[in-house]
Image (tube, grey):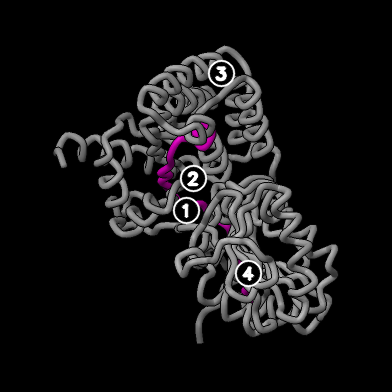
């Protein structure tokens, strides 16, 4: 690793850290003004320059032989960029979490104490392909009083740079340090290693991308990392389930948008209803183009389907492929999820209150659902307004991370001369 690269990344991170102290005490009005300026620019001439930069990235990506899916994630057009601007405006309209006090109470000695939300400081975002993440991360970090250090993929370098410049300009125009949004100006992969080694400068890193990227960051980082390796999500159809509800939920969880982390990858069915339910769900899935991979008991009922391999139960397909297993009631379902779940999203379909309660209490996942699709594990769908990612770690956030999750809680107290006896 070159000394020049280390000095470059470290220097930029230090200036971003200094900017975070200014942003931490900026008023809600100034932060919102920055976001609204950025959104307006994205819709105007600066946005046109973003599209020109994106066209350059797309041309290079095609020459590199990137897949159609990767090219689609990279592509920006006027409609998509306007949607990005709408997202920035939406963040501006959300309540500011900074300075809010929760769990406030008065002690017997009259001391009033509580927990106040405060920015984390400097947040590092490492991401691939999607240039919209630049705007999403910048707007969420700014609104929550944090500076952000961005490390995008080389395939979107020009697009990311153009978007970051819009936020830098908006910050300067509102009298705030432009360094609060800093995009690393290099495509050298070694820059990531420098960034995640900056203990004491970078307060938290959020990697967004494939499992390989996230594991690499988690294994090499010297700063706290928010992890989300994969989403191996399950729907368990209990013996008491309403069959029509179960079918509707299963279809939505698998086929509504199969390429996302909260899509169902495995369907578990209670042995008591499997003979009647599986033929219906199998036919419906096949009609949607879903390939089924079944265990022995499910295959006997479904007929001509592929047999699931041991590796299949731990695979995030992000595609129209579904594992199906017959289980011995809720105990079998809980055991399967405990062995193969990824702490992401787990749902039960049931009319049995006791089983619903067991599922809620015993399943370890960032979102546990009763009678609802796994597709709801999303910041917007859960009412957060926006999210910077979904955490499947438990410190300090579990599940979708919105503005509140980009803050920490510090104890605050107000007294009238109290002293410790």
Q: Residues within 10 Å of mark 1 (few under 14, many from 20)?
A: many
- Would residue 367 be found to the left or right of residue 252 on screen? left
- Would residue 56 be found to the left or right of residue 100 on screen? left
Residue 175 visible within the image: no
Where, by quadrant of the figure, is residue 84 drawn? top right
| Span colored in magenta | 110-133
Mark 3 vs 4, N-terminal side: 3
Mark 3 vs 1, N-terminal side: 3
| Mark pair 4, 2: CA separation | 52 Å
| Mark pair 2, 1: CA separation | 6 Å
Q: Nearer the viewer, residue 83 or 213?
A: 213
Q: Residue at x 70, y 73 (%)?
A: 269
Name the element at disc 1: loop
Q: Nearer the viewer, residue 167 or 234?
A: 234
Name the element at disc 3: helix
Disc 3 target residue:
47
Mark 2 vs 1, N-terminal side: 1
Q: In which quadrant will I find the N terminus?
A: top left
Pointers 2 and 1 in contact (CB under 8 A)? Answer: yes
Tell me the mark number nearer the camera, choosing from 3 and 1: 3
Give x and y (percent) for residue 243.
83, 67
Vertical comparison of 185 with 302: above or below: above
Disc 2 target residue:
146
Q: Is residue 125 magenta?
A: yes
Mark 2 vs 3, N-terminal side: 3
- Would residue 309 be found to the left or right of residue 378 on screen? left
Q: Residues within 10 Å of mark 2 (few under 14, many from 20)?
A: many
| Mark pair 3, 4: CA separation | 53 Å
Give x and y (percent) for residue 363.
61, 76
Disc 4 target residue:
299
């Amino acid at each position: 690793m070159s000394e020049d690269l280390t000095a470059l990344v470290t220097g930029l991170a230090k200036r971003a850290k200094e900017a975070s102290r200014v942003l931490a005490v900026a008023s809600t009005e100034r932060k919102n003004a920055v976001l609204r300026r950025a959104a307006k620019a994205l819709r105007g001439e600066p946005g046109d320059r973003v599209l020109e930069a994106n066209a350059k990235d797309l041309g290079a990506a095609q020459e590199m032989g990137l897949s159609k899916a990767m090219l689609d994630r990279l592509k920006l057009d006027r409609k998509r960029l306007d949607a990005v601007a709408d997202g920035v405006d939406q963040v501006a309209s959300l309540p500011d979490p900074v300075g809010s006090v929760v769990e406030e109470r008065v002690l017997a000695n009259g001391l009033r104490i509580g927990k106040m939300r405060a920015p984390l400081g400097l947040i590092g975002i490492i991401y691939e392909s999607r240039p919209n993440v630049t705007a999403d991360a910048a707007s969420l970090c700014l609104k929550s009083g944090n500076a952000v250090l961005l490390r995008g993929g080389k395939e979107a370098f020009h697009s990311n740079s153009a978007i970051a410049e819009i936020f830098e300009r908006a910050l300067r125009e509102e009298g705030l340090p432009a360094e609060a949004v800093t995009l690393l100006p290099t495509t050298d992969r070694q820059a990531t290693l420098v960034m995640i080694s900056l203990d004491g400068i970078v307060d938290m890193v959020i990697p967004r991308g494939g499992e390989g990227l996230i594991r690499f960051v988690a294994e090499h980082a010297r700063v706290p990392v928010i992890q989300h390796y994969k989403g191996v999500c399950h729907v368990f159809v209990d013996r008491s389930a309403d069959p029509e509800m179960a079918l509707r939920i299963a279809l939505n969880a698998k086929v509504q948008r199969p390429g996302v982390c909260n899509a169902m990858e495995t369907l578990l069915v209670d042995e008591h209803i499997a003979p009647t339910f599986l033929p219906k769900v199998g036919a419906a899935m096949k009609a949607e183009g879903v390939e089924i991979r079944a265990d022995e008991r499910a295959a006997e009922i479904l007929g001509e389907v592929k047999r699931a391999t041991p590796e299949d139960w731990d695979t995030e397909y992000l595609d129209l492929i579904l594992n199906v297993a017959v289980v011995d009631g809720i105990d079998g379902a809980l055991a399967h999820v405990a062995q193969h779940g990824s702490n992401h999203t787990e749902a039960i379909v049931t009319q049995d209150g006791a089983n619903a309660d067991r599922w809620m209490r015993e399943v370890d996942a960032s979102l546990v659902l009763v009678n609802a699709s796994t597709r709801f594990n999303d910041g917007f769908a859960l009412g957060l307004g926006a999210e910077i990612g979904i955490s499947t770690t438990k410190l300090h956030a579990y599940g979708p991370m919105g503005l509140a999750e980009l803050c920490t809680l510090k104890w605050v107290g107000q007294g009238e001369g109290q002293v410790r006896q």
